[in-house]
Every structure is written in structure tokens, then in C-alpha cells.
Amino acid sequence: MGTRTRAISRTWKNFKRHPLLHLASISTISASCIILGGFLLCSRNFQNIAEKTNPNITGTAYLRENLSDYQVSQLKDRLLAQNHIMKVSFKPKKKVADELQIFLGSSAGEVLPGSELFPDIMELELHKDTSTGDIAALTKLLSREPEITEVDFSEDWLAQYKKVRGLISGLGWVLMLALVLGCSFIIANFMGMRHQSRKEEIEIVQLIGAERSFVLTPFVWEGVIEGLLGAGLAMGILLFGKWLLGDLIANEWTAVLGTSSWLFLSIEQMLLLAFIGMATALLGSFTVFFKTAERFR
Amino acid sequence: MAQKMVHIRGLGVRYSASRYALKNVSFDLDRGEFAYITGANGAGKTTLLKILFAMERASEGNIFVNNRDVSGLPRNQIYQYRREVGFVFQDFKLLPDLTIYDNVALPLEVRKMTPGEVDHRVRGVLSLVGLGDRAHDFPQTLSGGEQQRVAIARSIIGRPSLLLADEPTGNLDSGTARDIMSLFMEINDMGTTVLIATHDEGLMDEFPARTIRLQSGQLLNDRGQA
């Protein structure tokens, strides 16, 4: 029997001998992973909805009155030649008024009061990676075009959107760090309790000639197994929760959110969760490792 | 010294300049010898055994067990040394959630023996201590005497050259104590050097052997030396 097989066999025996303590550790890891996984799940779906709502950055260039088709075409070419502009579409004032009427709920045929004042417009779609600074520079540049009277990229909304995304992302990292540290602390305490309960065993095993590794290896294996089981359980619960609540949310909120399909965690996120579960449990194990190592000095 | 199992010269354990647990203790034990260490509580019996088992360090003196210098033993070699010496505790030190079989097998698991070898040896030694039919019971289901037999079985399963016992009959009634002493004699007859710390004069009279008497940490007398 190899050293690793022996260690796993002893770990399995330890699991059978102290089932409640191990269950407590697994539950703690699982609860932490559920919180983190839930956050990742919400974040992923938020991003999905946000992308569906407004996949690209758009803006509007308001044009002077009475431009010829040739002038519009020339302007369109010049705009498309700009670095950050991906797509340009011309909309005459009639079409703008019709779209506004549809948005307001009246039929397209009716005459909207004041619609004769609307200008023709160019709708601009920018590349996703265009920064706020690039937009400001582009606005300045386009304002100099003789055919354009005003440019509006709704930068405020964009800035807010980016801020929210940044906040969520930052919050995610802070939460992740807090969870790993918090859970490690709790698990280290559980491990400490287990260590206390096995203190006598460790002493006895030392007295009959056990090497340091013989005593300590099972703690590390226990950490790996607990981490994987805890993270796996958390993913199972999250999947069940998504299945249970997914339909309900979809029925009630599809119209508002614009989507009826809910995403589960990506492979990378699932791997991250498994890694965090294992890292948390191992951190707990190593705490016991060093606590126990003290006893050997 | 080659024939000596234990060789102790000028052993001292000091806590401070004026407080000591052992002072200038010297004696030898031959291979295969049976001896008692005796004395009142606090005489230094347990400290002496702990030093011989590398559980405590001596402040001064030379201690050799089986030609190995115990006083200068590096910490990372203690576990190897302990595989050569058996120790029986007064409170048995059995693991309550392991069966008798697993408790006795533990020293062999530590030595990474194959399951076949372990099984062969455990059954043999359990049969020797008269517990062959209790292998799969748990310690708490056994009487004190039976638990001490398990502890003895565990201490000799690694075939140690020296067996130390600290008040092994201290928690047992007189009848059971006699059975345990008979078992130690039997183990000694098989060639193992046995050193028992006890203050039970009755048992020492009943099972006569060399007696090393300590008083306040010093060697008072050494009777019946071979």
C-alpha cells in the first residue's frame, strides 16, 4: 500500500470517526460558496441583461436643415473613417417623429405636434472599448463638422453604467477576499476543535513512534476533500435554486428585464468556486498543521 | 557497556539551581533483565522513565539505551528511537474510538507494515495477552485489567528491546495486578528487558526482582542486582 493510499485511508477513517465535525466544516464552506456563487450568478445575469439592453455605445449627431443626399453620404463616409465609430445610420426627421410616436403609444400616421422642428439625425454606434475620454474627444471633433449642429453620446449614462459595473466587480473581489478569510477563520476554528478532540490521539501516536507526516497528512487530505465537497454542494444548491426560481422570475419579470433565459455559472466561475472552497479548507488545515507542528518542537 | 541495555551515569534533571527532580543517578540494566524502580510519590520514578523514553531531557549526565545516546538524541530521530522502546502507561492511553485490534495495530501502521504482516502480528500478540476473542470490541467495553493488557499488547507488538512501564498496576485491583505482573514476567522470559516503576511493595515481594529505590530524586539503594 503506497503512502498516499495509506493517508487517504486514514483520512476516510477520520471522516467516519468524527462525522459531525466534518459535516460542520463542509456546511461552512458550502454556505460561503453559496453566497459567493450567488453573487457571481447575479453578476453574470446582470451583465447578460445589460449587454442585451445596450450592447454597444451609441450616440446621436443632429444635422443642419436641408442637407442634400450627397452631403449626407459624404458626412457618413467621413464619420465611418473615424477610429471609434463602428456604424452610422441616417434617419430623416419623419422617421424620428414616427419612432417617437410609437414610443409614446400613438399610431405612426398621426401628426405629432412640433415634429416639424425635429432635425435629421445620424445614429452612431461606437466600439465597446471606447473610453469616456475617447468619447469626449470624438464629440469635440464631430462638433467641428459643418453639417452637424450638436452631438450627444449620453456619456453620463455610460459613466454611471461603467461605475456600477466597476463597483460590482470591486465588491465581488472584496466579498471573495472577505469570504476566504472569514471562512478560513471559521474552518480553522473547526479544525482547532477537531485538533483538540484529537489531541490525545496525536500525543499517543507520537509516543508509539509516528513520524510528523503520519500525523499531519490526513489534515491536508481532509481539507482538500472538505473543500471539494463544500463547493460541489454549494453549486448543486445554486443550480437547484436557479431551476426553482428561474421560471418564477422569468414569468414575472421578462417584460421588464427583456430576457427569459437565465444563465448558470460559467465553467471558469465553477472552477473558481471549487478552488476557493479548497483554498479555504486547506488554509484551515494548514492552521492546524502549524498548531500541531508547535507540539513537535 | 556492549552488554548493557541501559547505561546511566550522573543523571540529573534540574528545574533551578536548588530544585531538581533527579540528582546524580547512576545504574545499568543488562539485556533481558527485569527490574523495578520504586520510591514514594515525587521520588523521580516517572521522570526517570520519561527520560529513558525521550519524553523529557536530562540536564546533566549520560544516558545510553541499547548503545544509543538518548541525552543527545536529535528531535527528528526521537520517533525512530521510540519504535525500539515500548512504554506502558498507568492510564493505558488507548484510543476510545478505535477497536482493540486497531489500537494494537497502530504502532505497525506507523511503521508502514503490510496489512498481512499487521494482521499476523496483532492476532499473535492479542492471543499472548489473552484477548484474542475481543479484537473487535472497543476499549470502554473492557475492564481495567483488560485495557492494561491491550496497552501492553500495543507496547510489545513492535518487538521492543526495552519495555518501560509507569505504575502499570496503579489503577487495578490486586488480583488483576498479579495477572498483569505475570504477563510482564512472561514478556521478560521472551528476552525483553523490562523496567517497571511502582510503589506496590506487595507485588514486588510476590514477583521478586532487582529493585532500584529512589528518594527525593537520588538513588537510595539498588538491591538484587545481577
Image (cartoon, rainbow, N blue to C red):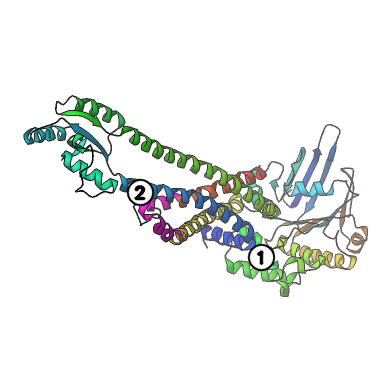
Q: Residue at x 9, y 36 (%)?
A: A73
Locate residue A204 relative to residue A177 in the image: left or right.
right
Q: Is residue A8 above or below residue A116?
A: below
Question: Label 2, on which residue?
Answer: A49
Q: Which residues are magenta?
A: A245-272
Tag 2: residue type? Ile
Tag 1: residue type? Asp
Observer-nearest of A184 and B224: A184
Residue B190 can be seen in this image: no
- Asked whether A77 falls inside the magenta stretch, the response is no
Q: Secondary structure at mark 2?
A: helix
Q: Residues within 10 Å of mark 1 (few under 14, many from 20)?
A: many
Instruction: State if disc 2 and disc 1 touch (CB < 8 Å).
Output: no
- Asked if marks 1 and 2 fall on the same chain, the answer is no
Chain under numbered label 2: A
Locate residue A131 relative to residue A264 in the image: left or right.
left
Locate residue A99 relative to residue A15 in the image: left or right.
left
Q: Secondary structure at mark 1?
A: helix
**Residue A266 percent location from the top left of the image:** 38, 52
Observer-nearest of B177 and B183: B177
**Residue A255 percent location from the top left of the image:** 35, 54
Q: Residue at x 66, y 65 (%)?
A: B102
Question: Label 1, on which residue?
Answer: B102
State the CA–CA distance, disc 1 to disc 2. 60 Å
- Asked whether A258 falls inside the magenta stretch, the response is yes
Q: Nearer the viewer, mark 1 or mark 2?
A: 2
Q: Residue at x 69, y 67 (%)?
A: B99
Locate residue A154 relative to residue B38 in the image: left or right.
left
Residue B131 can be seen in this image: yes
